[in-house]
Amino acid sequence: MTAKGGLKIAAVEDARLAGPACDVADLIVVAAMLRLEACRSGARLVTAATLRRTGALELQSSPGGVVPLDIMRPAIAPEELGHAWQRHRLYDWRSRRFADP
């Protein structure tokens, strides 16, 4: 999908398609859990793990269609992850450990 301003967005359900999506889109949203944390191409990558930590994300693109980190606003600010009622967002059920906030 191409958004207003030329931003190319890819939504991927199959984690195996995340790499190819990184090569063709500016913003990739992967519904599955994924070990990949960033795209080599520099495209913005949002995974299920990202959304677990941040909650919803508000995205605003610059005139060139790029999504800089500073204008991806999380519903849950990083400093809020230290609160007891947000701590569950840092739990990794695979390793059975809590990540650092």
Image (tube, rainbow, N blue to C red):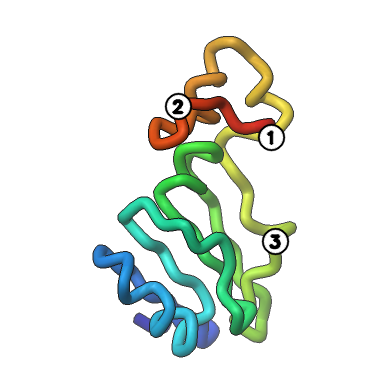
Disc 2 and disc 3: Cα gap in Å? 29 Å
Q: Is residue 10 above or below residue 95?
A: below
At label 1, counting other C-alpha atoms closer than 10 Å, the crowd grade (few under 14, some 14-19, many 20 or more) is few
Q: Nearer the viewer, residue 54 or 90?
A: 90
Location of the C terminus by quadrant is: top right
Instruction: Give amino acid for label 1.
Output: Pro
- The answer to whether 43 appears left or right of 48 in the picture is right
Instruction: Name which quarter of the figure residue 69 lies in.
Output: bottom right
Q: Residue 68 placed where, x, y %?
A: 69, 68
Q: Which residue is mark 2?
A: 96
> Are the residues tagged 2 and 3 within 8 Å (C-beta)?
no
Q: Which residue is mark 3?
A: 69
Q: Earlier in the sequence, mark 3 or mark 1?
A: 3
Location of the N terminus by quadrant is: bottom left
- Please give the label number shown on residue 78: 1
At label 3, counting other C-alpha atoms closer than 10 Å, the crowd grade (few under 14, some 14-19, many 20 or more) is few
Q: Is residue 64 above or below residue 15?
A: below
Q: Is residue 84 above or below residue 20?
A: above
Instruction: Give amino acid for label 2.
Output: Arg
At label 2, counting other C-alpha atoms closer than 10 Å, the crowd grade (few under 14, some 14-19, many 20 or more) is few
Q: Residue 72 placed where, x, y %?
A: 62, 56
Instruction: Name which quarter of the figure residue 14 lies in.
Output: bottom left
Q: Residue 51 placed where, x, y %?
A: 47, 45
Q: Nearer the viewer, residue 32 or 86?
A: 32
Instruction: Give amino acid for label 3.
Output: Leu
**Number of marks present in the image shown:** 3
Q: Earlier in the sequence, mark 2 or mark 3?
A: 3
Residue at the image position 54 percent from the left and 52 percent from the top: 58
